Image (cartoon, grey):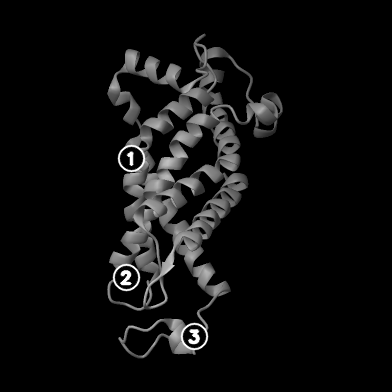
Amino acid sequence: QLVGVAPEKAIKLSVNDLLRGWFGEEDIEGNKQVALPLEIIAGGSAGASQVMFTNPLEIVKIRLQTIGEQVRLEGATPKGAVTIVKELGFFGLYKGASACLLRDVPFSAIYFPGYASAKEWCTGDKDKASPLDLLTAGAMAGAPAASLTTPADVIKTRMQVTGSGGKKPYNTIPEAAVDIMKNEGPTAFFKGAAARVFRSSPQFAVTLMCYELLHNLVHPESEPRPPTNAPISKKDYKD
C-alpha cells in the first residue's frame, strides 16, 4: 500500500486537475467553471490513468491477504511480496487490468464531480474552504462512488485472486460475472460495499484535503479578491 498509493493518487489527482483546467471556462469572477459532462470525462480519464499503478498494487495486495487461507486449507507455502512479484512477472502484474479499469474509471467519474459539488456546498458563502469543509466534501463524494462501483470491484478481486479448492481463476469479465450471478445471485456483486464505503470515504477525504492544502501552499493566491460584487474578473481588477 505504501509503495503504490503515493504515485497512484499523485497521477490521478494531477490528471483530473489538468483536464479540468483544459475544459474549464472562466466566469465573471475569474473562476474556472466546468460543464458536468466534461467533469465526468476528466474524472474518468484520471481513473484510467492510475491503473498502471493500481493494478500491480491490487493484485499483490490480494495475494498477500489470501495466502493465509491457502496455507491453512491447502498447505501452500507462505510468500512475501517480492516472491509474488517474481512469480507473476511484468504481464502477470496486470492480470485483471480490464476489471480494474471497469472499477476505477466510473469511480473517479462519479467521485470528482461529486467532490467539486460537495466542496462548493460545504464552503457556502465563505471565501475559502476550510480543512473541515474539504474533509466533509471528500467523505460525501466517496460514499456513492465506492458503493456504486462495488460490482466491478468484486469482479476484479475474483479475477486477481488465485484459484482455491481446485477452482480455476477467472480470465475475463464476462466469465466472472456470469459465474457469480449463476452460483451466488445478484447480491454477491455488492458484497463488501459497506466496507468499501468505510474505507474510501475517509481515505479520499484525507487525500483531497492534504492535496488541496499542499496545492495552496505551493501555489498560494498572489492577488486579492476584488473588493466589490461588480461583474468584473480578477484580471480586470488586477489591471
Inter-mark Cα distance, 2 to 3:
20 Å
State which tag comes first along the sequence, 2 or 1.
2
Indicate the secondary structure of the residue bearing disc 3: loop
Pointers 2 and 3 in contact (CB under 8 A)?
Answer: no
Q: Is residue 235 above or below residue 140?
A: below
Inter-mark Cα distance, 2 to 1:
25 Å
Indicate the secondary structure of the residue bearing disc 2: helix
Determine if residue 76 is in view. yes
Looking at this view, is 151 or 66 the one in front? Answer: 151
Indicate the secondary structure of the residue bearing disc 1: helix
Q: Quadrant of residue 79?
A: top right
State which tag comes first along the sequence, 3 or 1.
1
Q: Which residue is mark 3?
A: 223
Q: Residue 9 at what x, y percent from top left?
A: 54, 52
**Left or right of 34 on screen, residue 82:** right
Identify the mark at residue 15; answer none if there is no mark. none
Q: How many marks?
A: 3
* Residue drawn at x 56%, y 34% as measured from the top left: 61
Q: Which residue is mark 2?
A: 123
Q: From this viewpoint, which residue is outermost toward the top?
A: 166
Q: Quadrant of the N terminus?
A: top right
Q: Residues within 10 Å of mark 3 (few under 14, many from 20)?
A: few
* Residue drawn at x 37%, y 51% as measured from the top left: 37
Q: Is residue 32 above or below residue 93?
A: below
**Left or right of 65 on screen, residue 184:** left
Q: Residue 84 at what x, y percent from top left?
A: 66, 28
Identify the mark at residue 147; answer none if there is no mark. 1
State which tag comes first along the sequence, 2 or 3.
2
Q: Residue 69 at what x, y percent from top left?
A: 51, 22
Residue type at mark 1? Ser
Q: Residue 221 at what x, y percent from top left?
A: 50, 79
